[in-house]
Image (cartoon, helix red, strand yellow):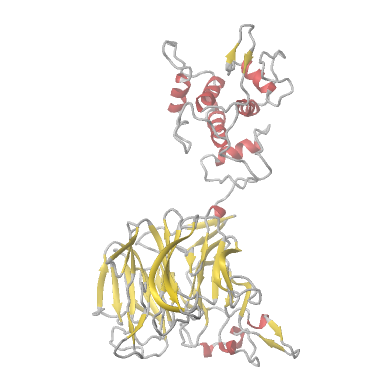
């Protein structure tokens, strides 16, 4: 019984699309869209990998002796950009371009020794919860359902290794030298015949996926290539492979993505057409039929993979209903006939493996589906069952959709953890609109602000009037007030903002918020600074450019805002400008930088 689960890769969705890049500390990882969701695991928007479910081979990063099943997601690894899991094993791509595996991964091999009660040392199976580094300079990863592994390097070369029992790695493992097998020849380990070192099988690749008995790749010219062992595949000469291993062979042109299943394979062409190909991937494709137009990706099978015929219980019947995700974000099931959900960006399916044993009353296998929406919300459409008196699954009851997580990373978009930050702050990124301003303020002489802690700038925290004037005073070089007279009732002589307020008052930048009969004033240093006040402070600092003489009926901030608007200062922040809105730290520093650093020639 072949390919119970389809393997999907969608790395380039349309012709001419620029491949997204993830950059961290100057290291670039390219290769198109990455899978941030897989079987019982996901990557959050910070690049953290969370996993749950089966741990019988350490695939959740824990020793199987500690637990064989996790009910709740646990943090396994950080700085991850792509993940692929197939029950027993995991492969990930990290932000630095390194690929790592763990679980039943064919990489630990002889490096993991186990002592048994009799004291004899034997090599254990190729498994373990400890991540094993496979390679550097990796652009994309994939893994088949029988632990076939593959990596696409940044130079376009495709490499495979792992379970070669069906000659599904694109080469004959028996022809490899001994150095490709980590488990020694004298080991009783059954994995001793499996290559654990990647072997190059193809050049000029931009997308690929490992299947169940085979694999496919899209080259940079849009051609689709097939390899492995599948007697359902026929070529243009009408000859089926007949179960014989096939090296990488070109079978189709103009392909943007594909989905590989049992006798059904699906392709999405560069024009957005999705076609289902029944046992005839190559040649004139006489048996293909069109599924839909304007398609982003096809994923299958949708439901009820195998069901025993009533007339012949021993003969399974295949139901192949694909999910179809359109370019407008609408997800459909049953080959496009059933609307599922809107605003979807990624879909993945896996066998329901929480308990594969199901009572004979309903001898079907079902899939769980992971649906990722554009707002970062992850859902699972999962099968439900009744239980028998032994607590085992008795009958399939239907599907339910449940929310799994928020803040899941979207394929093809940079994770916040990978965006370069303004050091030393963990909450300010260089590509934030205020990023350059914060960097300027932190390195300014004298220092304008060093944040609220050693690593936090708190860009959303509201600024007080005392802080705002102090930032301005520091940006101007901390000039001494000409007079030591303090006219403000609410400004203590020893306050950190005292000199700044006195200087600003002497310069006509502010006269406070209230004047009393005796000539004293209030400054209200602890009140939030409003946007109109901050812009007016800066306008007056610049010498009141564009000031109009007609003041009748004119707001005190009108000239300042007109000037700032002409200089495109007001439109540079994330929030729409509102005179009376309280101003956060990010925007106060942004206004200071725009005026005093970029417009200082207007003074």
> In which quarter of the view is residue 191 placed?
bottom right
**Residue 235's spot in the image, x, y percent?**
31, 84
Q: Toward the viewer: 255 or 579?
A: 579
180 w.r.t. 328: above or below = below
Front position in the image: 41 or 389:
389
Quadrant of the snapshot with the C terminus: top right
The image position of residue 512, as x and y in percent, is 59, 17
- Residue reaching furthest to the top: 518
Q: At x 29% / y 70%, what residue is drawn?
A: 335
Quick one: which residue is furthest to the right in this view? 119
Percent from the top left, x then y, of residue 480?
A: 70, 20
Q: How many circles with numbers are drawn on the protein? A: 0
Residue closest to the eye, 233 or 406: 406
Locate residue 470, reporting x and y percent. 64, 27
Task: Compare residues 316 and 41 and report the one nearer the observer.
Answer: 316
In screen coordinates, is 365 left or right of 119? left
Question: Left or right of 486: which side holds 307?
Answer: left
- Dividing the image into 4 quarters, which one contains the N terminus? bottom left
Query: Looking at the rendering, which quadrant does residue 102 occupy?
Result: bottom right
- Asked if one can make out residue 286 in the rendered structure from this viewpoint, the answer is yes
Specify whether residue 94 is in view. Answer: no
């Amino acid at each position: 019984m072949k390919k119970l689960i389809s393997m999907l890769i969608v790395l380039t969705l349309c012709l001419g699309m620029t491949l997204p890049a993830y950059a961290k500390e100057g290291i670039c990882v390219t290769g198109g869209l990455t899978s941030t969701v897989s079987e019982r695991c996901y990557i959050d928007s910070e690049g953290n990998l969370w996993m749950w479910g089966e741990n019988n081979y350490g695939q959740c990063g824990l020793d199987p002796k500690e637990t064989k099943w996790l009910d709740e997601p646990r943090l396994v690894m950080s700085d991850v950009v792509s993940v692929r899991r197939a029950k027993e094993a995991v492969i990930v791509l990290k932000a630095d371009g390194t690929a790592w595996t763990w679980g039943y991964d064919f990489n630990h091999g002889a490096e993991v020794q186990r002592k048994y009660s009799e004291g004899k040392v034997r090599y254990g199976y190729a498994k373990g919860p400890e991540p094993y580094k496979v390679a550097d300079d990796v652009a994309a990863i994939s893994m088949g359902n029988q632990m076939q592994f593959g990596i696409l390097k940044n130079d376009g070369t495709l490499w495979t290794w792992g379970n070669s029992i069906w000659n599904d790695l694109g080469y004959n493992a028996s022809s490899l030298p001994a150095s490709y097998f980590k488990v020694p020849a004298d080991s009783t380990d059954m994995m001793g015949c499996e290559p654990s070192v990647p072997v190059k099988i193809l050049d000029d690749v931009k997308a690929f996926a490992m299947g169940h008995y085979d694999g496919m790749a899209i080259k940079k010219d849009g051609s689709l290539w097939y390899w492995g062992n599948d007697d359902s595949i026929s070529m243009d000469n009408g000859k089926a492979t007949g179960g014989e291993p096939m090296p990488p062979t070109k079978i189709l042109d103009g392909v943007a993505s594909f989905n590989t299943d049992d006798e059904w394979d699906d392709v999405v062409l560069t024009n957005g057409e999705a076609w289902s190909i029944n046992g005839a991937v190559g040649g004139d494709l006489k048996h293909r039929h069109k599924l839909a137009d304007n398609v982003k990706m096809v994923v299958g099978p949708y439901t009820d993979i195998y069901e025993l015929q009533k007339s012949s219980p021993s003969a399974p019947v295949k139901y192949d209903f694909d999910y179809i995700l359109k370019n407008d974000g609408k997800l459909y099931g049953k080959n496009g006939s059933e609307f599922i959900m809107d605003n979807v960006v990624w879909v993945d399916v896996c066998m329901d493996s929480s308990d594969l044993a199901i009572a004979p009353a309903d001898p079907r296998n079902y899939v769980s589906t992971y649906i990722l929406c554009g707002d970062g919300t992850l859902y699972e459409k999962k099968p439900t069952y009744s239980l028998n008196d032994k607590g085992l699954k008795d009958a399939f009851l239907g599907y339910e959709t449940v929310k799994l997580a928020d803040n899941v990373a979207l394929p093809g978009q940079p994770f916040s953890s990978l965006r370069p930050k303004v050091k030393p702050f963990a909450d300010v990124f260089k590509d934030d609109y205020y990023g350059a301003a914060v960097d300027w303020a932190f390195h300014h002489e004298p220092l304008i602000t060093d944040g609220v802690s050693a690593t936090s700038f708190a860009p959303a925290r509201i600024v007080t009037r005392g802080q705002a004037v102090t930032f301005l005073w520091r940006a101007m070089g901390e000039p001494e007030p000409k007079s030591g007279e303090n006219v403000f009732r609410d400004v203590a002589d020893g306050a950190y903002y005292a000199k700044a307020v006195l200087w600003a008052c002497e310069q006509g930048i502010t006269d406070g918020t209230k004047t009393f009969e005796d000539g004293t004033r209030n400054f209200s240093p602890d009140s939030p600074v409003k946007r109109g006040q901050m812009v007016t402070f800066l306008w007056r600092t610049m010498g009141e450019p564009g000031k109009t003489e007609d003041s009748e009926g004119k707001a005190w901030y009108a000239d300042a805002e007109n000037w700032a608007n002409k200089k495109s200062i007001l439109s540079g922040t994330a929030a729409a400008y509102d005179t009376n809105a309280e101003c956060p730290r990010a925007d106060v520093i942004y206004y200071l930088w725009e005026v005093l650093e970029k417009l200082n020639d207007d003074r």
